[in-house]
Amino acid sequence: MKDKTLEDILKQKTQAERYILECIDTNNVKKLDNKKIMSILHTILCWEEVNGTIVLTDKNILSLDEDIMVSKHHRFIDIPKHKHNFIELIYVYSGSCTQIIDGKETILKEGEICLLDMNVEHSINAVKENDIIINCIMRREYFDASFFLEFRLMS
């Protein structure tokens, strides 16, 4: 592990990505409907459907004692339109990603970030092998308590 660079580690397929690749034919990934995609992702991401909208909640992603989590975005499969009750910071480490945010296509390139507030509907097109996207998920309480306290201390 000492000899591996961060990039080597991030480019490795996660267990979830290996599972995704087992479940799909990458040549036909665009033919999958949202229900099929979410059935594949349900073992990875716990979600609910509320009035036809996919909703991810912090209680299904963060443990009770966590207010923040950093993870690598799952590659190889579209993430259908959804919203969540947490704040999400998306950082493109390498490559790019295309999101549809409130109906508007947004392309993020290497080195760019996107900050999504709670309850913003968005989807993410499947990213490829060399597209490395880092997600930082924060409960609102983390943002309120930690983030703004730092600004008060600096003033």
Image (cartoon, grey):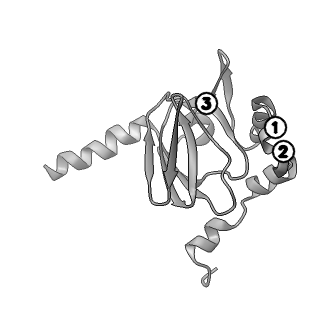
Q: Is residue 63 visible?
A: no
Name the amino acid type tagged 3: His
Q: Depth-wise, is mark 1 or mark 3 nearer the camera?
A: 1
Query: Can you say whether 151 is above or below 6 in the image?
Result: above
Question: Residue at 67% across / 51% down in the picture?
Answer: 74
**Left or right position of 149 against 19:** left
* Badge number at residue 31: 1
Which residue is more in the foreground, 125 or 65?
125
Figure check: 90 above or below 129: above
Read off the residue under disc 3. Answer: 82
x, y percentage for residue 128? 68, 56
Task: Please name the amino acid that badge 1 sits on.
Answer: Lys
How packed mark 2 is, by other alpha carbons closer than 10 Å (few <14, some 14-19, many 20 or more), is: few
- Cα distance, mark 1 to mark 2? 5 Å
Q: Tell me which numbered mark, 2 or 3, is placed earlier along the sequence.
A: 2
Residue 139 placement (x, y as % from top left):
46, 38
Q: Quadrant of residue 103?
A: top right
Quadrant of the image containing the N terminus: bottom right
Quick check: 33 above or below 91? above
Asked if labels 2 and 1 touch by Cβ distance under 8 angstroms, the answer is yes
Q: Amino acid at mark 2?
A: Asn
Could you say which quadrant of the image residue 4 lies in? bottom right
Query: Label 2 belongs to which residue?
Result: 28
Q: Is residue 14 left or right of residue 55?
A: right
